[in-house]
Image: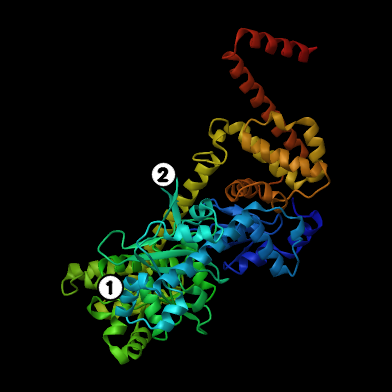
Amino acid sequence: MPLPEAFMQELKARSEISEVVASYVNLRHSGRNMVGLCPFHNEKTPSFNVYPENGSFYCFGCGAGGDVITFVRRIENLDYMEAVRFLAQRAGLQVPENQVDDGMARLRSRILEVNRETARYYYSILNSDQGKPGMDYLNRRALSPGTIRHFGLGYAPASRYSLVGYLEKQGFTQNEMILANVAFKGRSGQAVDRFFSRVMYPIIDLRGNVIAFGGRVLTDEKPKYLNTSDTPVFNKGNFLFALNFAKNSGTEQLILCEGYMDVISMHQAGFTNAVATLGTALTPSQAHLIARYAKEVVLSYDSDEAGQKATARAIPILREAGLLVKVLTIAGGKDPDEYIRSNGENGRAKFKQLIDSSGNDVEYRLQKIKQGSNIQTPQGRVDYLTGACVVLATLENPIEQEVYAGKLAEEIGIERTAILQQIKKNRSKQKKYQEQKAFKAFQQQSAGVRDSINPEKVQHLRAATAEEALIAYIVQYPENAIAIEKLLQPEKFVTTFNRRVYRTIMERVRNAKAASLTDISEEFSVEEISSIAKIFAKFQGVSVTMRDAEEYISVIQQEYEKMSVENVNSAEPQEIQEYLQKLRSQKK
């Protein structure tokens, strides 16, 4: 059952979109609207817009959009009802749960229960004779019993059916295990354990729920690490390992590592502010998550080539989330875990010194360029300065540019103004490229290219454009909606998706209900709501009259009739006769 209308209107009134979004994104005013860097993709030029007047947001860069509920669904990785509960708790409202029939919420709850029991099972196996291989490995890595217990580490036994059998005894179905991704369907059709002969690392969210697992094999078998795939409760790009502990470390600094063991060893050594990504490259969503709990992040990736590439990719993403970035360099190519253990009792103190003495990301990048240039030669100095100016052009703060330009000038023996001029040229090129990229993406979106939500748009661009304009009009002027519907029934819409949107809005208006994006968001998926938000964004600030609306209706009717004629041309003789008879009757 849908939630009561009165509750939804109260929730909407207490969840002003700009306030909710501002708790995740740095926004600035742009006329009556607000703009900022999109939290859902990596960008340098702000293309993320918030429209307080109609309670929507839209990113012209990646196409993410929607209302305040959709925003929370995306940023917190929640389903519709969980997002409503999240906002209700924030607003001090009680959700009338007894009126809600939410199958997805029940499914997510069951998956979390599966994960919790799975974590308990793996932990119990680790502490039994079956878990000896896993315990021997953890002992070799010098983990204490307290650390093992704190992180809930476990071991998946060699049998391919042990977990499935255990969970069945606990009352879980094989389908629930498969949906949780702790099992998969084998050739026989029966569920098979996904993890076996691996040390297991539970991944826990900020609410204390076990949402996924990482498993490390103890042989040379590939893959070395196997992680839970995306499930209804987990998306690897939206979470960080050990953030549930690190957020309570009492510091405004987080240490970002590559792997589970690095994080666990660092926590054991007293660095409880360490976190790690989950088997993928850092995402903008994870960077914004870090920015909610810290002002500074220390990149502590491996010193090998892969680690250096990961560092180079992560720096701009973290900076664009508003974070101060430092880069930790460990001599000898050791990872943090190796370094701490190899220094014995002095491991913690020495590692703390490394963190305190680590340079910021600009210094790190400049040093990397310098290492690849022979500054003893004229060409080497040119190469160094050219690369350095590209780096400094990415800095938003002109004071930073001035400081580093001065250092370079002194180091190489060149006028600071020459360096600043080159930085300005590079910055202009970067800005132009970003603008062209954003404009091209917007053109493609507007033309219906690659529109998976409304695939018919590209074949019926004129009709779809008029349909979108009419939808935007009736949302802006709902008092005219009934008059509009008398002129144009939903059946006359050419594209299926726009017809569905039009019909949904009209149904609410007929029942004297509000028809904003938030009011209809339960009826559509996150991706569909983004598509509707794009319509609102495209017509934001455009003055439209009833006469304009009548012209849109005329276009839609023309395109509908044209499509009918095309259909008739390929119709059977009897169908053609019926169509001609219909036209004659319309003329009388």
Residue on which the image places disc 2 = 188
- The residue most toward the left is 377
**What residue is rendered at 39% in x and 44% in y?**
187
Within-10-Å neighbours for mark 1: few <14, some 14–19, many 20+: some
Q: Secondary structure at mark 1?
A: loop
Q: Residue at x 61, y 15 (%)?
A: 568
Residue at image x 55%, y 42%?
446
Identify the amino acid type marked 1. Answer: Ser
Q: Is residue 346 left or right of residue 2?
A: left
Q: Which of these two is toward me, 164 or 12?
A: 164
Locate residue 137 relative to residue 466 in the image: left or right: left
Q: Which residue is mark 1?
A: 303
Residue 284, how many percent across, how many down?
A: 47, 63
Q: Nearer the viewer, residue 456 or 239?
A: 239
How far across and how far down the image is residue 111, in percent? 55, 59
Quadrant for residue 83, please give it.
bottom right
Vertically, is 418 above or below 146? above
- Location of residue 441 in the rendering, given as x and y in whole percent from the top left corner: 48, 47
Q: Specify whether residue 545 is in view.
A: no
Q: Mark 2 to mark 1: distance in Å?
A: 45 Å
Question: Tag 2: residue type?
Answer: Ser
In the rendered image of this protein, does residue 52 appear above or below residue 376?
above
- The local crowd at label 2, few if under 14, some if 14 to 19, many if 20 or more residues have their Cα within 10 Å, is few
Give the residue drawn at x 49%, y 70%. 120
- The colour scheme used to paint the residues is rainbow
Q: Is residue 429 left or right of residue 289?
A: left
Comes first in the chain, label 2 or label 1: 2
